[in-house]
Image: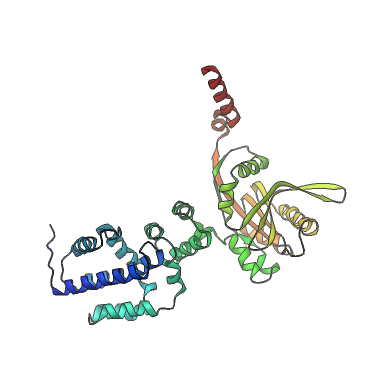
Amino acid sequence: MNKIILDKDYSIWLSQIKEKVRLSQIKASLSINKELISLYINLGVQILEKQEYAKWGENFLGQLSKDLRSEFPDISGFSKRNLELIRQWTTFYLPLLLQNTKQAVSQIHESNTQITKQLVSQLQIADNKSIDAMLNIPWGHHILIIQKIKNTDEALFYVAETIENNWSRSILEYQIETNLYKRQGAAISNFKNVLPLPQSDLANELLKDPYNFEFISLGEKAKEKELEQKLVQQISKFLLELGKGFAYMGQQFQLKVGNKEYRTDLLFYHTKLKCYVVIELKYKEFEPEFIGKLNFYISAIDQLVKDEADNATIGILLCKNKDNYEVEFALRDINKPIGVSEYRYKELPDTIKQAFPTLKQLTEELKSIETNEQ
């Protein structure tokens, strides 16, 4: 058992922590997220400092947990495990939390005089939008992020995206596991050349490469129609993968140009960009002629569907795979905004896929069982 050595300094510090909790309760209930995270930031910094210099023994967090829970029995965030998580979270973000990291680290190693007041003061005056953002997501989301992410830039990306898209914890976990950080904005496009700022930057950010369609499974000999149909059947998951702002307008959208009728694979409207988005699906490797067809569809939407208040229509070409240099070359003289990405899905050998019953077959079998039981 670890020996605990408590002294007058610990009692004074404990009183200060209790007072901070009381003040936080007066301002707002700790269930209000900003107050809770603010409290955890200050508590975490002080835990790190006290751990460095105080002579209270290795298990002082256990004692602190006991004392705080005794004083505040209705607050669930003071278990020893949560105090350890607060320390881990503060350590992870320490360079961000301190206004001058090098100076603060030097202070920690050279002097312990008034160090807590200095660190907390720096926290309070730090003008940092990232810290403001951190106050706006739940504690459970923070823990998920630091347990799965290794660097602060990536972590802050998921903090910002959680706020922007109002993600639940399960959706956040899905986005982390599918590596949204590296996929978003990674597609090849000509947006910077053909769209004005800031629309070009926003349009580029909405693209991913590759898109993750692992919520569908296709056989080796599947065709584009089957891919399109599967995505429409799973439209809620498809929209989640596309990102915030996409409104589904339909599949095989009809366009009459001259005496002929044409149909786009999928048509969306992006509420933030204020424009139509044509998505063409290709169940094979990229070929330059795909750009020409998509360019034609964009022109048709601009002429026949787009309103005067709408911005220029955007095209997204999704291929099974591509050569980036070939894509860049194909887009070089195209004046319509087009982005090209790959996609990933669950591929099953046709022999295995055919062994599974279809939804229609399962439905008919269930009806047959119900009829026999009656």
Residue 12 placed where, x, y %?
19, 74
Question: Which residue occupies 16% across, 75% down?
Answer: 9
Residue 107, quarter of picture: bottom left
Specify whether residue 132 is in view. Answer: yes
Residue 19, quarter of picture: bottom left
How many numbered discs, if any? 0
Q: Is residue 349 above or below residue 140?
A: above
Extreme-right residue of the structure: 259
Closer-to-camera residue (336/157) = 157
Quadrant of image for the N terminus: bottom left
| 105 left or right, relative to 176 | left
Residue 368 placed where, x, y %?
56, 21
Q: How is the image coloured?
A: rainbow
Question: Which residue occupies 59% across, 54% down?
Answer: 242
Q: Is residue 42 above or below residue 140?
A: below
| 372 left or right, relative to 271 | left
Residue 180 placed where, x, y %?
51, 57
Residue 241 placed where, x, y %?
56, 52
Closer-to-camera residue (168/332) = 168
| 29 left or right, relative to 281 | left
Specify whether residue 151 is in view. Answer: no
Residue 5, quarter of picture: bottom left
